[in-house]
Amino acid sequence: MNASAPASTPVTAPVSAPVTSSEQGTAAAGTAAAPPVFSVRNLWKVFGPKAERVPGGPLAELDAQALRERTGCTVAVRDVSFDVRPGECFVVMGLSGSGKSTLVRCLTRLIEPTSGTIAIDGEDVRGMDKGALRDLRRHRAAMVFQHFGLLPHRSVLDNVAYGLEIQGMAKAERRAKAAEMVGKVGLEGLEARRPGQLSGGQQQRVGLARALAADPEVLLFDEPFSALDPLIRRDMQDEVVRLNRDEGRTMVFITHDLGEALRVGDRIALMRGGRVVQCGTPEEIVGSPADDYVRDFVRDVPREQVLTVRRAMRAALPGEADTGPAVGPETTVADAIEAVARTGSAARVMDGRRCLGVVDHRGLLGVVAGLDAPGPDAPGEEAPGRAAA
Ligand SMILES: Nc1ncnc2c1ncn2[C@@H]1O[C@H](COP(=O)(O)OP(=O)(O)OP(=O)(O)O)[C@@H](O)[C@H]1O
């Protein structure tokens, strides 16, 4: 690897973005009301000759093979619309070839879209000139790739500071900033090592620290952990969740792994054949699959670990709002089962001091079994005794 930033090197150039979502705190995470960071409408990417004739026309109705035979074109992204909200981790998930990488590369025009609109903070990305695009990729939406393209002869600290260096930041300043990022990703004490003296997971952390040093408004991750073994991979997923929650940094995260998507995502866009077949929270995807494809996709997910008590809740009967264990509305069904089993009585779902409803063993087991939760007027369960959970 030479020092002239190979193509696979993440765009990690420095300089703080102006006011970033990281300064907005976690309260904004995934807030539907906040203006979106990225706003994508009717996006198409067609590869092949005269690609622009395909979107929206009769050719677009052909199946992939017929289209290829007739025109030599492949539709990688088909009429996709979504928003990425400030502070959320937005996951793009799908099987190999479903269009994930193409879609995310279109966001910063690493791949040129065929048609549709893309805006970042309301600014038209498709209308940006070269200078604005460079600024976009360096300061506003930095990409973190699976292969971080670390420079083998440089120390960890200098690798993290690399982007700041090419940006012209003074040595003392960039080293101080790099040291801060090294600490942030848990690599203290390893600053002087070379990449070859690190494990795969540690190398990923160096790449992550380097991307963070640029302080981009959005981090775009392209399957960053797929080469890691499962335990290290889990560590890195936790790291991403922590960065997202603690700093409120907006993230777009590509993965083909459903478990990873459910662990890190605030919302997930599930792709198939270039389309987004469903976009929603992990709970919506697992609890209310949009079609048979999604249902099949999530079939083996342990529902109780993803779905929350909101799905199992019913209205409190007289007296129930004041007794029994209290759980928050975001408590998973698995945790509520534990609370109900331990105490033997229905649990109150509390939003601060307000009782939203109660969950009992019937409602909780109903969710596990994939049955509808009892409605608010459903008759109460028999007096809480030994919970069946
Ligand atoms: N440069 C290209 N020219 C022609 N077709 C392409 C090109 N890049 C991607 N494709 C096609 O577009 C479709 C989507 O590819 P893409 O790489 O976006 O999928 P993906 O979901 O990211 O897959 P993977 O998980 O394997 O990386 C595929 O059918 C692919 O073959």
Image (cartoon, grey):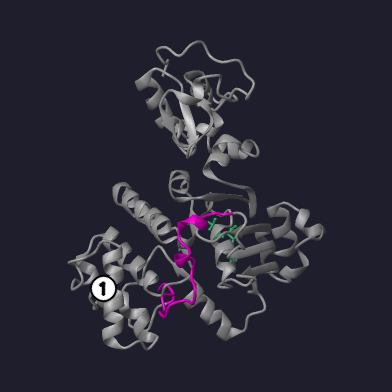
| In magenta segment, residue 14 | yes
In the image, is residue 2 above or below residue 205? below
The residue that appears at 61% across and 54% down in the rendered structure is 32
Horizontal placement of 51 versus 358: left or right?
A: right
Which corner quadrant of the image does residue 291 belong to? top right
Residue in the foreground of this view, choosing between 50 and 286: 286
Which quarter of the rendering shows the C terminus? Answer: top left
For label 1, the residue is: 179
The percent coordinates of residue 16 (x first, y second) are: 43, 77
Residue numbers of the magenta segment? 7-31
In this view, which residue lies farthest toward the right?
Answer: 58
Horizontal placement of 363 versus 124: left or right?
A: left
- The local secondary structure at tag 1 comes to helix
Ligand 1 image-quadrant field: bottom right
- Give the crowd class for mark 1: few <14, some 14-19, many >=20 residues within 10 Å: many
Is the CB of mark 1 within 8 Å of ligand 1? no
Residue in the foreground of this view, choosing between 272 and 71: 272
The percent coordinates of residue 14 (x first, y second) are: 40, 79
Q: Is residue 94 visible?
A: no
| In magenta segment, residue 141 | no
Q: Is residue 122 visible?
A: yes
Residue in the foreground of this view, choosing between 102 and 211: 211
- Prevailing SS of the magenta stretch: loop
The residue that appears at 40% across and 74% down in the rendered structure is 9
